[in-house]
Image (cartoon, rainbow, N blue to C red):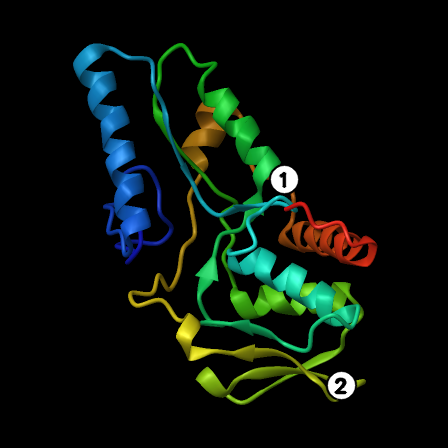
């Protein structure tokens, strides 16, 4: 919804600038909620949730692509994980806490719209560093841009490489949310660190690959 961000950090009053059909569709849903609430008195809240992750995240999203892909590399089932823009930054939080925030919105006397976010922004490269370390890799980055790759120092293997085909046509470079309204009104705040979240996802995917059980 914020896409090409107009201010940093982004809160409930930040102008929207979606950069994909997905973002445009979310914006339509958001304004539909606002419209029905104001026009018909419907008790409806719009949760503006920044990236919320867990071991149940879809495999097409970069976080899960990294944790599942590196788990397969660690267990000898894959050679290299291919990713897009390493320098894109996101505000990643734990999905279970965000679901709790959604419930808390609906317990208020009056409906409203709330940003849920951690207030921390980290790059895709940083996420990969954490996932690799959690699986016992000791990586070194070489090259820049589309030539960047992560090499495991122990084996000399390239375990992560950039594929320019995976870059977005209209990139969302940097997202970081301001959830002060949610903290003030709901008493909600993100508690799980990114490092803890990464290790949770890595362990789940390693166990799935090792046992041969991949349900999600």
Residue 188 in sight: no
> Which label sits on residue 191?
1
The one of 65 and 135 positioned closer to us in this rendering: 65
Q: How far apart are marks 2 and 1 (CA)?
A: 33 Å
Q: Name which residue lies at 28% across and 58% down.
A: 4
User: Looking at the image, is mark 2 or mark 1 nearer the viewer?
Assistant: 2
Q: Name which residue lies at 58% across and 83% down.
A: 149
SS for dot 2: loop
Q: Is residue 10 left or right of residue 51?
A: left
First reached walking from the N terminus: tag 2 or tag 1: 2
Q: Name which residue lies at 23% across and 32% down.
A: 31
Q: Is residue 42 left or right of residue 198?
A: left
> Height in image: 128 above or below 21?
below
Crowd around label 2: few <14 · some 14–19 · many ≥20 (10 Å): few
Indicate the position of residue 93 as horizontal and vertical percent values: 56, 46
> Height in image: 94 above or below 145?
above
Are the residues flagged by discs 2 and 1 in contact, CB closer than 8 Å? no
Residue at the disc numbered 2: 153
> Height in image: 190 above or below 198?
above
Indicate the position of residue 116 as horizontal and vertical percent values: 46, 37
> Which label sits on residue 134?
none
SS for dot 1: loop
- Total number of numbered discs in the rendering: 2
């Amino acid at each position: 919804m914020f896409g090409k961000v107009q201010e940093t950090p982004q809160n409930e009053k930040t102008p929207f600038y979606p950069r994909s059909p997905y973002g445009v569709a979310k914006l339509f849903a958001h304004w539909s909620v606002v419209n029905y609430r104001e026009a018909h008195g419907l008790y409806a809240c719009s949760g503006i949730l920044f990236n919320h992750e867990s071991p149940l995240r879809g495999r097409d999203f970069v976080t899960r692509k990294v944790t599942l892909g590196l788990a397969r590399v660690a267990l000898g089932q894959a050679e290299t994980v291919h990713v897009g823009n390493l320098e894109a930054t996101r505000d990643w939080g734990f999905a279970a806490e965000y679901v709790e925030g959604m419930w808390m919105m609906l317990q208020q006397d009056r409906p409203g719209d709330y940003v849920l976010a951690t207030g921390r922004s980290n790059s895709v490269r940083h996420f990969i560093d954490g996932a690799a370390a959690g699986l016992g890799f000791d990586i070194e980055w070489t090259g820049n841009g589309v030539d960047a790759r992560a090499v495991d120092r122990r084996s000399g293997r390239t375990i992560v490489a950039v594929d320019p085909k995976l870059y977005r046509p209209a990139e969302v470079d940097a997202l970081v949310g301001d959830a002060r309204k949610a903290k003030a009104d709901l008493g909600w705040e993100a508690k799980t660190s990114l490092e803890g979240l990464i290790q949770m996802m890595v362990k789940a995917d390693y166990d799935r690959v090792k046992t041969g059980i991949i349900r999600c």
